[in-house]
Image (tube, grey):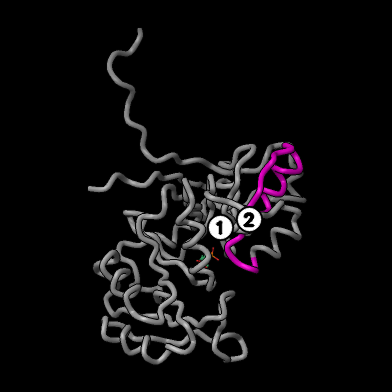
Amino acid sequence: MTPHGPPPRQGPVALHYARPASTPALKIPITQNPKEIAGRLAADLAQDGMVLGLGTGSTVYFTLVRLAERIRDEGLDLHGVPTSIDTEQKASEMGLPLLGLDEVEHLDLTIDGADEIDADFQMIKGGGGALLREKVVASITRRQVIVVGRDKLVERLGRSFRLPVEVVPFALSSVARALTALGCETYLRRDKNQSAYTTDNGCQILDCQFPDGIAAPHQLELDIDAIPGVVESGLFIDLAHVCVIGSPDGSVEVRERPAPS
Ligand code: 5RP
């Protein structure tokens, strides 16, 4: 009998990720690394002819690997704009064709990671220090796909991860005071030699700890951006469209951003 009425509503897609059955199991085992599962699945959203934004971090690394495989195996014509020197180096070692930001007006799809993402797809980014370039690339992207392990999903931003703020070195102390007045403690990010960490843009990062997390992310982004000497904050507001979530059991969920309430 033909069913009547609209089709049932679809919930989030829950897929189990496994390599093709023909793959020799001993050489390439089925992965249960949530970052690899999410990173690889997102690369499959890229289509022939697209110009992609290439995010930064250990999850996006797997996206780069998969994109390189698809270019090789499917002959796809893809180009990428990297969001950091690190990604630029990795992508070019893998043979991904790259473009500079000045060569594109917009990007079809960007795949990037996140340090925290809430139910409205608001995010903290910048754990890898690439927040400025990541936000510039996101701002000219038609579809921003975020790849994370399930542990990055949070109810409220900033409870466990410190919010990175990129700052012009000259203004470090005045910006730190202004950030403190917004209710946080600031920590100058340091590199492995204990020197002040320097971003790809020659700036420094203050990591901000809010005692009870960030109650009003939109307003906080405006307040931080208004401080002279701030280059960019790691709050990514209304920039993500899709979230690909890998889980340790080998499953992956693809969520579309919920409509604003
Ligand atoms: C870099 C970022 C990264 O996307 C974020 O830190 C997540 O990284 P990972 O995938 O390694 O957990 O914002 O600036």
Rounded to the nearest whole Å, what is the CA distance between mark 2 and mark 1?
7 Å
Look at the numbered discs 2 and 1 and tell me whether their residues touch, using CB distance below 8 Å. Answer: yes
What stretch of residues is rendered in magenta?
Answer: 63-86
Q: How many residues crowd around disc 1 within 10 Å: few (fewer than 14), some, or many (20 or more)?
A: many
Q: Is residue 83 magenta?
A: yes
Quarter of the figure with residue 213: bottom left
- Residue 108 x, y percent position in the rendering: 53, 44
Q: Residue furthest left?
A: 261
Picture disc at residue 35: 1
Picture disc at residue 196: none
Is residue 75 something one can see in this rendering? yes
Residue beneath the point at 51% across and 58% down = 137
Q: Look at label 1 and name its amino acid.
A: Lys
Q: How many residues crowd around disc 2 within 10 Å: few (fewer than 14), some, or many (20 or more)?
A: many
Is residue 244 something one can see in this rendering? no
Determine whether 200 is above or below 61 in the image: below
Q: Which of the two labelled residues, at mark 2 and mark 1, occupies the earlier sequence position?
A: 1
**From the viewer's perspective, is 207 left or right of 90?**
left
Q: Is residue 8 magenta?
A: no
Q: Nearer the viewer, residue 219 or 145?
A: 219
- Residue 162 x, y percent position in the rendering: 40, 76
Picture disc at residue 62: 2
